[in-house]
Image (cartoon, grey):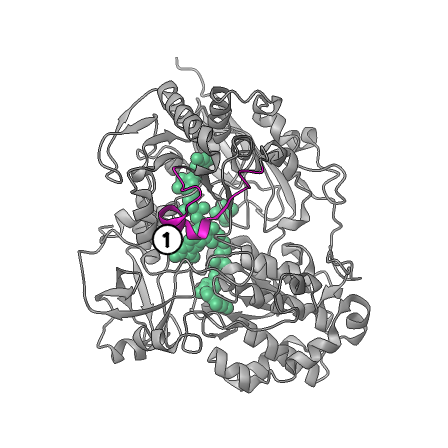
Amino acid sequence: MSLPPDRHTVRAVCPHDCPDSCAMQITVENGRAIKVQGATDVPITRGTLCAKVAHYEERTYSDQRLLYPMKRVGKKGEGRFARISWDEALDEIAERFAKLAATDPRSILPYSYAGTMGLVQGSSTDRRFFHRLGASFLDRTICAEAGFQGYKASIGATLGTDPEAFANAPYILIWGANPVVSNLHLWARIVEARRKGARVVCIDPVRSLTAEKSDWHLAPLPGTDAALALAIMHVLIRDGLCDEDYIARYTTGFAALKRRVHDWTPERAAAETGLTAAAIEQLAREYGQDGRHAAIRVNYGLNRCAGGGAAMRAIACLPALTGHWRSPHGGILLSTSGSYGVDDHALERPDLYPYDERLPPRHVNMSRIGDALLEDRDPAIRAIMVYNSNPVAVAPDSNKVRAGFAREDLFVVVHELFQTDTADYADILLPATSQLEHWDIHKSYGHLNVMVNEPAIAPLGEARPNTWVFRELAHRMGFSEACFTESDEEIGAQAFRKSHPRSGNIDMTTLRTQGWQRLDVPTPFAPFAQGGFPTPSGKCEFYSDTLAQQGIDPLPHFVPPREGPRSNPELAAKFPLAFVSPPSRHFLNSSFANLPRFKDAEGRPWLDMHPQDASARGLEDGQRVRIFNDRGAFHATLRVNTEAPGVRQSVVSAPSIWWQKLSGDGCNANAVTSQALADMGGGATFYDCLVEVDDDDGPPAAES
Ligand SMILES: Nc1nc2c(c(=O)[nH]1)N[C@H]1C(S)=C(S)[C@@H](COP(=O)(O)OP(=O)(O)OC[C@H]3O[C@@H](n4cnc5c(=O)[nH]c(N)nc54)[C@H](O)[C@@H]3O)O[C@H]1N2
Ligand SMILES: Nc1nc2c(c(=O)[nH]1)N[C@H]1C(S)=C(S)[C@@H](COP(=O)(O)OP(=O)(O)OC[C@H]3O[C@@H](n4cnc5c(=O)[nH]c(N)nc54)[C@H](O)[C@@H]3O)O[C@H]1N2
Ligand code: SF4
Ligand SMILES: [Mo]
């Protein structure tokens, strides 16, 4: 008689770079994860996961998983490897790093982003290791930095409306965001609000799934949102739709703002945005309507352009003008990440950096990794260690990125679950554990809870967590500090500051028995109902001294796209289409794009184009086209929807991010995107990009 199966459940957290950070429950039978579900007791998750993660066993047990350390045997980039032992791999890395560090440790660069959002596997032992080594600092700008800095200039920190409260909002403005695709659990609250009668308006150059389901869709040209926000302010002030009491008590610089927006008539904004003046008037009046407090969901979609910081800053001023902050469901939500008192110092130990006058700290902006690898000197980058990221596929201007990674004199280490486009360039390729195989603690940028991820299963093959790898390297490099011997749980226990007003209640015992805890914030939570903005003045800053000190216009302003008819008419004549490449539904950045279920669901690389732009070029729905500019080219299948165009005129959109080697022609959207940086925070400008499209059909389409 066979024994009954050993079956139990384990609490976990979705590790992906998604605001929802869902709480998961893993069912394990005889040591194997057999089911992955959303936890039913955590408010925002409410028992559901998105389609990508509901099948997480497939990703975990995929036959594409890397299971052993390997060493390159083919040419750089060819992706041919032979198995070696962990000892051989780690010894070689430590030896190479030590040799470079003896001359100048800044020739070594870590490269990581948010492959896992876990505080332990995402940013702890790795940072400690590179700090102690004295390596170059990586400025992690690829996603949110411009918008983050712009939001901070107005509001002080990434605090905002509680996502749960959206369910009660009477009017919701979704701006540069596509929650149906990339923030599903917020969309569930918006659907709830709508059932109660809310009006939902979406501002997006693309007719996204969210735009399609909204009551009203406005499609401005990419990179022109600040002009729209300035004109909304103009109308609000002109028509007396402001909350004067709120302005007087809780804001600074209103008189200067009033002068600034005086000239920003709807007509002027119409010329920049490609919207009609009438639509802008209507939007402003709806938003400012007396007697109700509107919610704005703004997202990073609109910060990937030259004026991304300025756009976010201007939009973030709106709820203080109207006093919408007075209600828990009013205000604006960009990210909740600033709600937590994360103890970065304890996790990352910047104090370990060996300050040496002869070798001043060197920073490398990840959004220009191509140029950095090819051009930076004093010192040149001689070794790069990539983990939690797939730069060859996701970083802009990928022809340059590939050329950089292909350098014969660059030592490349990649720690990964899969053999990504980047892994192909590794000299040493190390196997990483999945979220089901390691311990972690998570905050979120789309809710207000802290959650614990307990390992559900043993590591597959010889896969090892990030922390283990850096602990082993630290040991081999002779780093004897006690922080390099701490266990993952010991690191996690230091993640939140007890002294922080909202994190003081977080304790490991409760977390590990209950799985999650809400931050110490009231329900309902109206963060700025009575001001208390975490800016230098304690107010919402229409005028920002902080920006003035950085040499940036201290008042809300518009920075036109770098690649556009106004800034660069010659370029716009040659490449007249504005190109965006927003997240696709079945991928998460470049994650999942190698797994059959998701690749098949996405089908093939698409390019959405307006029927008039297609007919002007003699192009037809379903044909293969080439998208190109002076930086490069890639191919996609054209989608022209004549009844409901997928994009506004003069804009084209390619849902992303495909793996280059699986996309048919070996290139993806980043063949054409630019390494130029945004106005604030050194942010990336993926959506500030002009292209032309023709019928050069190139190599065969990706097989799905
Ligand atoms: N399924 C899925 N979910 C994801 C991701 C994914 O790849 N796939 N990525 C995750 C990551 S890393 C992030 S940062 C988040 C948020 O990711 P974001 O990049 O903010 O993406 P979305 O929320 O999808 O919203 C972006 C929307 O902004 C639009 N947009 C582009 N340019 C402009 C502009 O100039 N102005 C305006 N108004 N709109 C513009 C795009 O067309 C798109 O519909 O999503 C996360 N969630
Ligand atoms: N064209 C275009 N490009 C874009 C964007 C766009 O909208 N358009 N969006 C940009 C944005 S917003 C972002 S955030 C970036 C995202 O870029 P990345 O952060 O690079 O995101 P992913 O492509 O998901 O790659 C993460 C990798 O980490 C690996 N990984 C996961 N967990 C672990 C782990 O525990 N250990 C290790 N060692 N590895 C792990 C995964 O297998 C995966 O290959 O892309 C940017 N690039
Ligand atoms: S990707 Fe986002 S929506 Fe999907 S399970 Fe993860 S956190 Fe939830
Ligand atoms: Mo991102």
Question: Which corner quadrant holds the N terminus?
Answer: top left
Residue 587 visible somewhere in the drawing:
no
Q: Nearer the viewer, residue 48 or 217?
A: 217
Q: Which residue is mark 1?
A: 657
Count of residue discs: 1
Displayed quadrant of residue 342: top right
Q: Nearer the viewer, residue 448 or 479?
A: 479
For mark 1, does the 10 Å Cα neighbourhood hold few (<14), some (14 to 19), or many (20 or more) residues?
many
Q: Position of residue 398 (x, y in %)?
A: 33, 53
Residue drawn at x 49%, y 40% as measured from the top left: 136
**Residue 57 within the magenta-colored segment of the rendering:** no
Tell which residue pokes out farthest to the front in this image: 358
Displayed quadrant of residue 505: top right
Q: Position of residue 475 (x, y in %)?
A: 50, 20
Q: Is residue 36 left or right of residue 452?
A: left
Displayed quadrant of residue 485: top right
Does the beta carbon at disc 1 come under 8 Å from ligand 2?
yes
Residue 79 visible somewhere in the drawing:
yes
Q: Nearer the viewer, residue 5 or 159?
A: 159
**Residue 377 within the magenta-colored segment of the rendering:** yes
Mark 1, secondary structure of its residue: loop
Q: Position of residue 332 (x, y in %)?
A: 64, 63
Residue drawn at x 57%, y 84% as measured from the top left: 266
Callout 1 amino acid: Ile
- Boundaries of the magenta span: 357-383
Q: Position of residue 31 (x, y in %)?
A: 44, 23
Residue drawn at x 69%, y 57% as measured from the top left: 156
| Above or below 263: residue 625 | above
| Above or below 87: residue 349 | below
Q: Is residue 229 left or right of residue 214?
A: right
